[in-house]
Image (cartoon, helix red, strand yellow):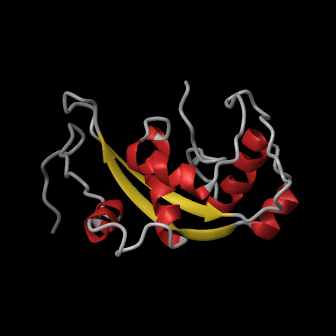
Amino acid sequence: PSKWDPTVAGGLPVGMGLFENVIKEAEEEAGIPNTMVTIGAKSAGVLSQMTCCSDGSCLKQSLYFIWDMEVDKDFIPHPADGEVDKFERWSVETLESEVRQGERLRPARLVATDFLIRHGVITPDREPQLVKIQSAMHQDRYIFPHKGAIDSGASEN
């Protein structure tokens, strides 16, 4: 509630390809026609993020596959599935201000920061911590080994 997010986002269902999911989510969340996404959406990378509750519990590691799609200046997405109240167009200056000091982008700050870096708004000359920021956005995912009750303890020969 009262937070801003990328135009389209969503989890990846089992058995569905990444681009297929982008097409589905764009139609469901923003009423963007499939053909427009198929022609216009371009893969722009992948980000990683580890989050937890303020007390350190509920550790969650996520990967975000990023897609950009340039649209006409008069294009307006419309809420299609009830998950979104409205869409707003922001200037680059407003987006950068929200990334740097706002609270409205909290769930989407990672993706918005990546966008601003890739489009030359946040640069090494303007952001002395750029290397540190980019390193944090591209962390390796860690797999924590777990020996469950199913493991009989027998070794393989």
Picture coordinates of residue 73, whole percent (x, y): 81, 59
For this rendering, which residue is in front, 35 or 30?
30
Residue at 74%, 65% in the rendered image: 70
For this rendering, which residue is in front, 130 or 7?
130
Residue at 77%, 68% in the rendered image: 40
Q: Is residue 129 above or below residue 29?
A: below
Q: Is residue 76 above or below residue 119?
A: above
For this rendering, which residue is in front, 93 or 106?
93
Picture coordinates of residue 3, whole percent (x, y): 53, 32
Horizontally, residue 151 falls left or right of residue 97, namely left
Horizontally, residue 30 falls left or right of residue 92, namely right
Horizontally, residue 94 falls left or right of residue 23, namely left
Picture coordinates of residue 17, whole percent (x, y): 63, 60
All told, the count of numbered labels is 0
Q: Is residue 113 above or below residue 4?
A: below
Quadrant in the picture for residue 137: bottom left
Picture coordinates of residue 143, whole percent (x, y): 25, 55
> Which quadrant of the figure contains the N terminus?
top right
Horizontally, residue 37 falls left or right of residue 156, namely right
> Which quadrant of the figure contains the C terminus?
bottom left
Spot the residue most to the top: 1
Residue at 49%, 54% in the rendered image: 96
Residue at 68%, 55% in the rendered image: 22
